[in-house]
């Protein structure tokens, strides 16, 4: 394998920070979409546990296929990343295996549309890949209850002691806003969200600003939010 690498274009090594010459043979064949070699390894029993990982990033085997396919997928003779990932999934490779950053093959596939990436996304979704990573996300029910205008602790303190406060848009003090498109303001209550609520509270306490507040990406619908508690955002001006 090492000798063969010397004949490959330099651009093949180091993609996504990976040095393909350090991959084990089985991972190497997946990385470059060598489906015939992958099949032979699995059928002969030489393949490692398909639920395992490779590289210090702990990439699952489906993630390895996606990461390489996004970068010069046709640079290796007979590369077929689509057939490779189909065979891996049919052979029991987990579709939702997370790396050290909590990202799955599907998450990596959304980072670029190069090569056959869109086809790989379709295959992953049709095979039941979950776009929500339970290890880093929680799902909560949202409540829309008007509690009047709200004021931040800093603004309240400055007003109380007589310090000037820069005017804030009304949107920064509203307690509720049922979304028409994407923007919303809601309340997440502990009742009915017990487990998710505790994960959010724990993240706020351990990673939040002053152990009092934190900001998370959230998406899905107005009545049900998927909050990425593994990804705390920078402090916002509201």
Image (cartoon, rainbow, N blue to C red):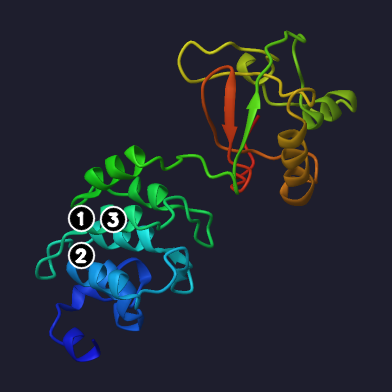
Q: Position of residue 150 (x, y in %)?
A: 76, 17
Which residue shows up at 65% across the image and 22% down it? Answer: 141
Left of 66 or right of it: where is 155?
right
Q: Which residue is mark 3?
A: 85
Q: Is residue 14 visible?
A: no
Mark 3–mark 1 Cα distance, whole angstroms, equals 6 Å
Find residue 83 and name its label: 1
The single residue placed furthest to the bottom in the displayed view is: 3
Work out whether residue 101 or residue 122 is closer to the camera in this orientation and state it.
Answer: 122
SS at badge 1: helix
Of the pair 42 and 4, the residue shown nearer to us: 42
- Side of 49 where 101 appears, left or right: right
Corner quadrant of residue 74? bottom left
Are circles 3 and 1 on residues that touch, CB within 8 Å?
Answer: yes
Image: 219 above or below 187: below
| Quarter of the image with the C terminus in it | top right
- Look at the numbered discs 3 and 2 and tell me whether their residues touch, using CB distance below 8 Å: no
Report which quarter residue 36 is drawn in.
bottom left
The answer to which of marks 3 and 2 sits earlier in the sequence is 2
Furthest residue toward left: 77
What SS does tag 3 mark?
helix
Label 1 with label 2: CB-CB less than 8 Å = yes
């Amino acid at each position: 394998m090492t000798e063969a690498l010397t004949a490959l274009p330099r651009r093949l090594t180091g993609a996504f920070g990976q040095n393909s010459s350090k991959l084990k043979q089985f991972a190497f064949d997946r990385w470059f979409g060598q489906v015939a070699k992958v099949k032979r390894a699995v059928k002969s029993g030489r393949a490692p546990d398909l639920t395992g990982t490779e590289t210090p990033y702990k990439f699952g085997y489906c993630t390895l296929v996606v990461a390489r396919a996004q970068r010069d997928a046709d640079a290796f003779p007979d590369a077929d990343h689509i057939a490779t990932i189909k065979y891996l999934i049919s052979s029991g490779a987990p579709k939702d295996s997370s790396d050290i950053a909590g990202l799955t093959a599907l998450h990596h596939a959304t980072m670029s549309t190069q090569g056959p990436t869109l086809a790989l996304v379709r295959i992953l979704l049709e095979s039941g890949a979950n776009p929500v990573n339970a290890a880093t996300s929680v799902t909560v029910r949202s409540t829309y209850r008007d509690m009047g205008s709200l004021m931040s602790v800093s603004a309240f303190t400055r007003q109380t002691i007589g310090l000037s406060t820069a005017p804030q848009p009304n949107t920064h003090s509203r307690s509720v806003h049922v979304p028409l498109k994407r923007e919303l303001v809601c309340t997440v209550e502990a009742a009915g969200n017990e487990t998710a609520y505790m994960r959010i509270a724990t993240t706020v306490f351990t990673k939040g600003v002053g152990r009092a507040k934190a900001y998370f990406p959230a998406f899905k619908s107005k009545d049900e939010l998927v909050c990425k508690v593994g990804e705390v955002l920078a402090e916002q001006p509201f």
